[in-house]
Image (cartoon, rainbow, N blue to C red):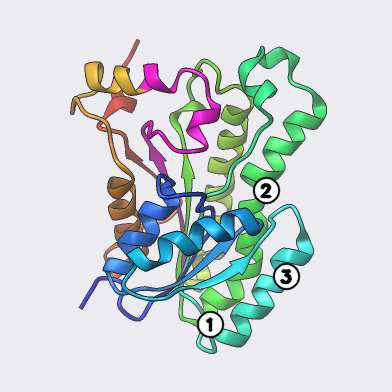
Amino acid sequence: MGLLEGTVALVTGIANKRSMAWGIAQAFDREGARLVLTYQHQRFRENLEELVPELGQTPALIELDVASDGSIAALGTWLAQQCADGIQCVVHSIAYAERHDLEGRFVDTSREGFLTAQNISAYSLVALSRMAAPLLAKAGGGAILTLTHLGSTRVMPNYNVMGTAKASLESAVRYLAYELGRDRIRVNAISAGPVKTLAASGVRGISQALRMTEERAPIPENITTQDVGNAAVFLASPWATHITGQILFVDSGFHILGA
C-alpha cells in the first residue's frame, strides 16, 4: 500500500518531463494516487500524452487555463461529476511572467507585466483553492500544495517580478491555510532549489544558480524533480495531517546561508 492509496490528486502545470509537477505526478503515481492532470493548450496535451506511458496508471487529462474563471469552473464541474466522494489533493505548479520583465530592471516593470505575473503565478492559487475547497471538504479534508522559490524573500538577479509574485503566493498560502483549516484542508508550499526546468530556462543565470548550490549549499549538490515529488508526497499524505501554512524548503539547505 502506498502512502497515497485511495487519494484523488489534481496536478497542474506539467509542461514536459523536466517539470517539477511531473516529478510530483510520478511520485504520487508511485504511492498509489489516482491522478487528474491538467494542460493549458493542445501542445502541452501532446507533451502529456507522451509522458503518460511512464506512469503505472492512465490519468485523466483535462484542459485548464487559470486566467479564465470559466475554465476553472468547468474543471470544478467535471471533478464534481467524476469524483463523487470528492478529491484529496490539489497541486498548483503554475507561474508566468513576461521574459522582458525578468531580464530588465525591476523598477522598469510595466503595470501590465506586474499584474500578469501576479494573476497567473499567485491569484491562480486562490482561484483554484476556491474551486477545489468544496471537493476537498467533501472528502473529509485534504491538501493544497504550491511551488515557490527563495526569490520571494531575497533578491535574486533576473528573478525580478516573479519574486514579488512568489511573495504574494506565500502570503496566500498562509491566508488560505487559516480560512480552510476548519474543513481539515491543509495549504503548504515547497520552496525548491534551482532545477533546469522549462520555466527556469526563462530566467537568465540558472546555470550560475545551479553551480552556486553545488559550491555553497550545506549539502553540496543540486536537487532533482524527484526530491520535490517526494516532499509533495509527504505533505499530501496522512503523515502531514497537522502541518499547514508552511513553506518546506527542498534546496540542499541553501536558504540558511548568509551572504
Horizontal side of 163 relative to 149 (left or right) equals: right
Q: Which residue is mark 1?
A: 138
What is the number of the mark on residue 248? none
**Badge 3: residue crowd in 10 Å (few <14, some 14–19, many ≥20):** some
SS under mark 2: helix
Residue in the picture at 49% in, 77% down: 87
Magenta segment boundaries in residue numbering: 185-209
Labelled pair 3, 2 in contact (Cβ < 8 Å): no
Three-letter code, disc 3:
Ala
Q: Amino acid at mark 1?
A: Lys
Mark 3 and mark 1: span between their CA atoms? Answer: 17 Å
Residue placed furthest toward the bottom: 84
The kind of residue tagged 2 is Tyr
The residue most toward the right is 111
Dot 1: what SS?
helix
Measuring from the top left, give residue 37's x and y in whole percent. 51, 65
Query: On the rendered structure, is 259 left or right of 220?
Result: right
From the image, state whether disc 1 or disc 2 is nearer to you. 2
Q: Position of residue 234 (x, y in %)?
A: 29, 59
Mark nearest the camera among 3 and 1 is 3
